[in-house]
């Protein structure tokens, strides 16, 4: 009997072992070519010709960028972790996220994958959302580019999955080192970032977190739905003199043509608003130039502040032609949890307190800033080029540290960046530029009666507001005369036309808003001395 039972057990084990083989054979006859969502080997980008229309569009759009490089096309599968897939992709690879998804695995025959939305939800633009989920941070390697490559009518969305436990969606760099061996730029484009996981939980601290690194990140043509804190964060406390070596310039960021949207966040019984759209903090990096730019972005919805920028001695940053239309009303999660009162408004520009070091310079040109609190906040000592901006808020300025000066820089060299930011009734003249091209506009809202200089406590130099200083007829151009080398380093800008109807009067509009037409710093002779 024992021997019989042993033989029966062996027979039963053999049947169990043979079962998978039978299933595999059955499936082999059922499926012609199994579809795999694991990353395929990279291929030369030029061999992807004839791919999906979305992929082909990106290859054509970035033809110079992809020339001679390797590419990989990924497909959306809600069961796959995009972060793990990208982790398996080599450095310096162009990663294209297609709007195609794997067809059902129960399909009796497998043909070319068809476009299947991974979500029935459509965006505000009416496009079908194709979701790529991440269960961990995407660690961006040296030279890796990530592009959404959706076909017409679709939109590529990256969002946390149900198992997401990290704080950031994409990270680059390290806290402890600049990683000087990694010098290739990385592009992130044509993606929508949605920080809420499928069950409605918002686990994201910041969508993008750049630590210490020494290459350029180009974040362009994306849509950011803000998490509970910050959309894009560049934050490095390590020390570096960026002028010492061209290959060691520190963290670079080109943030261009993105849409940043903030909404009221509700979790359990708590309601709050996002903190900031973008945050750059590089206080210990000296003499960094031409590495930081925030250009032609749209900030909209509810958030405490559109952006805060903290630079070290000799740093430079361009903030050109952005549109900021935000509501600052509400408390942030930090206020609710920690009791920390947050600054609210448009942009925060922060320098350093070392009076023996060169202040950082911010170039604020052609921006439309409409907020429900303060348009521009400044802290510590900075230099500011202010040209052709339209500020619309309760107050134009917040400068609490009176002992540190805000130095006004010559705006005329940046007149070309205005790009018709003001209305066409502002007179534009031929080169060299005139004051009319760089004049700013201040409009007070919510029955505020403040003027264009309100909130400034220590201004060195002059800012120019009120387009009424520009006559309707063509005026003689500005004459810029530089002193010969070796005498002193001052330039005298003499505006030759006369002012008409320059007034500090305040008039109320029918819409309940107050327009302050202030000609700050403009005198009859319009003579201005800029100390460079």
Image (tube, rainbow, N blue to C red):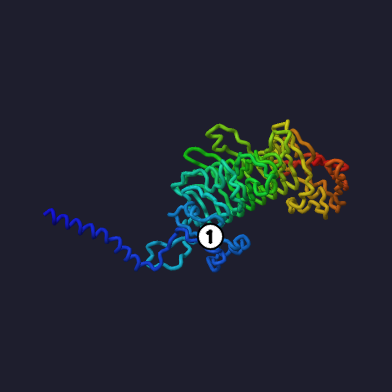
Residue at (46% x, 44% y) in the render: 165
Q: Is residue 90 above or below residue 407?
A: below
From this viewpoint, is residue 446 visible? no
* Total number of numbered discs in the rendering: 1
Q: Is residue 517 above or below residue 110?
A: above
Callout 1 environment at 10 Å: few (<14), some (14 to 19), or many (20+)?
many
Residue at (54% x, 69% y) in the render: 50
**Camera-side residue of 354 and 328:** 354
Q: Quadrant of residue 408?
A: top right
Q: Is residue 489 above or below residue 220?
A: above
Which quadrant, please, contains the N terminus?
bottom left
**Camera-side residue of 205 and 48:** 48
Instruction: Judge left or right: residue 470 versus residue 324.
Output: right
Element type at mark 1? strand
Q: Quadrant of residue 448?
A: top right
**Camera-side residue of 23 and 287:** 287
Please identify the residue farthest to the top as the structure is shown: 403
Residue at (85% x, 48% y) in the render: 480
Instruction: Judge left or right: residue 9 versus residue 531.
Output: left
Instruction: Judge left or right: residue 458 versus residue 57.
Output: right
Please identify the residue farthest to the left as the structure is shown: 1
> What percent of the width, then of the height, locates residue 312?
67, 39
From this viewpoint, is residue 151 visible? yes
> What percent of the width, then of the height, locates residue 193?
54, 51
Residue at (73% x, 30% y) in the render: 403
The residue indicated by pointer 1 is: 154
> What percent of the width, then of the height, locates residue 181?
59, 49
Which quadrant, please, contains the C terminus?
top right
């Amino acid at each position: 009997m024992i021997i019989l039972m042993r033989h029966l057990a062996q027979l039963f084990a053999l049947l169990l072992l043979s079962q998978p083989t039978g299933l595999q054979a059955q499936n082999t006859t059922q499926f012609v070519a199994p579809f795999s969502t694991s990353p395929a080997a990279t291929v030369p980008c030029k061999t992807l010709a004839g791919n999906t229309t979305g992929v082909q569009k990106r290859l054509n759009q970035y033809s110079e960028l992809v020339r001679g490089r390797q590419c990989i096309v990924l497909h959306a599968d809600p069961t796959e972790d995009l972060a793990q897939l990208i982790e398996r992709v080599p450095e310096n690879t162009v990663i294209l996220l297609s709007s195609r998804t794997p067809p059902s695995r129960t399909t009796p025959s497998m043909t070319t994958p068809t476009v299947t939305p991974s979500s029935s939800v459509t965006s505000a633009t009416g496009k079908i959302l194709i979701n790529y989920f991440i269960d961990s941070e995407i660690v961006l390697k040296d030279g890796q580019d990530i592009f959404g490559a959706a076909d017409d009518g679709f939109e590529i969305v990256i969002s946390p999955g149900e198992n997401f436990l990290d704080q950031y969606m994409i990270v680059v760099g390290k806290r402890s080192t600049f990683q000087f061996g990694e010098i290739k730029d990385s592009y992130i484009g044509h993606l929508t970032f949605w920080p809420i996981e499928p069950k409605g939980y918002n686990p994201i601290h910041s969508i993008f977190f750049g630590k210490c690194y020494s290459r350029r990140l180009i974040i362009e043509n994306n849509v950011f739905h803000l998490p509970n804190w910050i959309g894009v964060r560049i934050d490095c406390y390590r020390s570096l003199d960026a002028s010492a070596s061209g290959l060691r310039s520190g963290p670079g960021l080109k943030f261009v043509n993105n849409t940043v949207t903030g909404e009221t966040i509700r979790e359990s019984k708590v309601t709050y608003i996002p903190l900031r759209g973008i945050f750059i903090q590089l206080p210990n990096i000296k003499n960094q130039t031409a590495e930081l730019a925030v250009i032609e972005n749209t900030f909209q919805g509810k958030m405490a502040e559109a952006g805060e920028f903290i630079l070290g001695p000799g740093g430079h940053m361009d903030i050109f032609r952005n549109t900021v239309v935000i509501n600052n009303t509400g408390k942030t999660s930090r206020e609710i949890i920690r009791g920390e009162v947050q600054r609210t408004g448009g942009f925060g520009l922060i320098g350093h307190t070392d009076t023996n070091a060169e202040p950082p310079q911010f170039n604020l040109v052609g921006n439309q800033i409409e907020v429900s609190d303060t348009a521009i906040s400044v802290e510590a000592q900075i230099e500011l080029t202010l040209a052709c901006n339209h500020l619309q808020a309760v107050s134009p300025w917040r400068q609490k540290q009176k002992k540190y000066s805000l130095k006004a820089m010559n705006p005329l060299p940046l007149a070309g960046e205005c790009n018709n930011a003001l209305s066409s009734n502002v007179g534009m003249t031929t080169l060299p530029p005139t004051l009319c091209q760089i004049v700013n506009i201040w409009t007070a809202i919510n029955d505020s009666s403040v003027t264009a200089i309100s909130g400034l406590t220590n201004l060195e130099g002059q800012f120019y507001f009120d387009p009424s200083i520009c006559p309707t007829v063509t005026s003689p151009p500005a004459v810029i005369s530089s002193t010969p080398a070796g005498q002193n380093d001052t330039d005298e800008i003499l505006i030759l036309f006369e002012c008409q109807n320059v007034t500090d009067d305040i008039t109320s509009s029918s819409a309940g808003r107050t327009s302050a037409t202030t000609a700050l710093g403009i005198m009859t002779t319009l003579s201005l001395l800029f100390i460079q």
